[in-house]
Image (tube, rainbow, N blue to C red):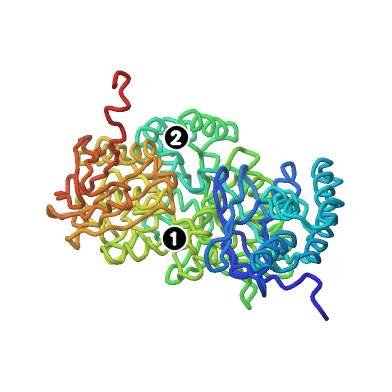
Amino acid sequence: MTDRLGSVFIESVQPELDAGRYAIKRIAGESLTVRADIFKEGHDVLVAVARWRQVTPAAQKTEWAEVPLTPKSNDAWEGVIPLARNGRYEYTIEAWPDLFRTWAHELKRKVDAGRDVKSELLEGAALLEGAAVRAKAVSAEDARSLAEAGARLRTPPSPEHLLVALSPELADTASRHPDRSLARRYDEVLEVFADREKARNAAWYEFFPRSAKRDGKTHGTFKDAQDWLPYIQKLGFDTVYLPPIHPIGRTARKGKNNTLNAQPGDVGSPWAIGAKEGGHKAIHPELGTFADFAAFVDAAKAHGIEVALDLAFQCAPDHPYVKEHPEWFQHRPDGTIKTAENPPKRYEDIVNFDWMGPARDALWQELKSVVLFWVDHGVRTFRVDNPHTKPMQFWHWLIREVQDLHPDVLFLSEAFTRPKVMKALGKVGFTQSYTYFTWRLFKDELRTYLEEITQPPVADYFRGNLWPNTPDILPENLQNAGPGAFRLRVALASTLSSVWGMYSGYELCEGRPVPGKEEYLDSEKYQLVAWDWDKPGNISDWISKLNAARKQHPALQQYSGLRFFESDNERVLFYGKRTPDGTSTVLVAVSLDPYAPQEALLHVPMEWLGVKPEETYQVHELMADQRSLWQGPDVQVRLTPEQPAAVYAVYRFRRTEHAFDYFE
């Protein structure tokens, strides 16, 4: 059967993720550049558009709109879709032959060849008359001018007729009312989710509110935790992430240093959620009340800080769910409930849900209600614990369900697992992801890995949130290390990515490990900790300067603008970022040696900067607050463990004496 949609081909549509199965990611207020290869047999002039609409939230749903695609070389086309608001959008591509422009093009060739074009003028008249009919419902003026032009082409031919037929103005008018009966629409309707700005630009600080008393003996409260907020604000963080704040199970409670037998007074792991006081919709009584939590959220907001909660879909054996819904859990052949494992780790104080069992629908709905419960209590960001141990289908469903109601909700995936699994979590909807940055130490591996995750196609769905440490992970490079190691790793994390975070104690260079493991000795996961924020040797000022640079320079707020450049020292990494409009540019040099000074000759990318080799330009080194003038591509830098990074804001001299008010 003949395809009634004609023979226009639409191929290689970008961006497109797994044939449209998943949505790509962008930021509200940005635009989406759409590209495709579009062609047809013969020499027809083609027209192509990108069709788009916002579909969620429901209150902001729009009708289909169209933006033109512009032809580039080799049958490539490109156009820009505006993503003005936070939410989910659909887009696709449609193309058709422009019958009138094709006719006009052929007419001119025949006229230039001296051919008789009487018949062709009648064909053109018919095309114009058809366009006039289509124009009536849209523009009476266009309908009239098209009809008049068609009538003129039906009178005996003259040079004036040819001028009319070939005028660009007439072609523009006819093209506004095309015959789209031969239009071809791309087979897939694709999706893009436009997140709010914090999806791309945020600095996270993780701390345990139960340690807020700071004496290591008394359980802290949300009221105590409010006293930390000015300190966190001074460090420059805009997101404070709290481990689970729910009642902690007593059955198989873990003791200090993850021992299996808790002693009286041991507080247990917050990730063992649920006790007689309640489960995922309850607050640990020693932290305070819901009113106290609301006051903490409000106080954080007053300090310019957003509160993120841990979303850990797991239960202690004495969680109310276990008694009320035993069908929601995995059982061994002997009837006992399975405890959780993430080999080689075992969690005797946690039991597993039966994610795909017969009671799946009720379980999934209940867990969705948990997220919405905390959304109703002012939480808009969730750090999700071990999502790679739960079904991808669940996360795809849950995140979509929540974001279709509340598009401003963000989800951070805490998954240190295989690369394809981590990427799949990004595809199914996670806003951000933890990364392998924690273990990338050397120049080539840092460059290779960061180029992979900050450039398309991976960056279309995966945003790497770089953490040098977590409560679970004290990497070997920070174990018993000096301040130089902590300075260089935080400099990398905060400038390589626009989203980064750290666990409290990092600023104190806390690095005492469990022997032979990448875990903290006397881990705060299992006990209260007394933090001394004035501890000698702390690097709080260094962190504050890095976060200040991020806030003051939009280039450092870009996730996908990262470029690496050459330095002649394998222990010095050199890279840069700039905004798409070029108004903010930052260059960064970081020593990867925490022990000794390093010198390097940096090769500055003059063409990338838009600076001619003979031009002088100004740089402001933000960590030492020093300004200097550079010329040419080669710059010498010396970095030390005390100052392992140089962050340069780059400025061009754009004014001459001609711009001065009194220049004559």
Give the camera-side residue of 281 and 429.
429
Residue 657, given in percent of the width and then of the height, sits at 27, 27
Q: Marks 1 and 2: which is nearer the front?
A: 1
Residue of label 2? 225
Asked whether residue 314 is in view, the answer is: no
Residue at 55 percent of width and 57 percent of height: 430
- Vertical order, 356 against 621 (above or below): below
Residue of label 1? 455
Give the camera-side residue of 384 and 351.
384
Residue 397, given in percent of the width and then of the height, sits at 67, 60
Task: Tell me the tag on residue 498.
Answer: none
Give the Cα distance between marks 1 and 2: 38 Å
Residue 540, given in percent of the width and then of the height, sits at 28, 39
Under circle 1, the secondary element is loop
Quadrant housing residue 469: bottom left
Left or right: residue 407 compared with residue 222: right
Amino acid type at image mark 2: Ala
Residue at 38 percent of width and 62 percent of height: 451
Quadrant housing residue 48: bottom right
Q: How many marks?
A: 2
Amino acid type at image mark 1: Gln
Asked whether residue 581 is in view, the answer is: yes
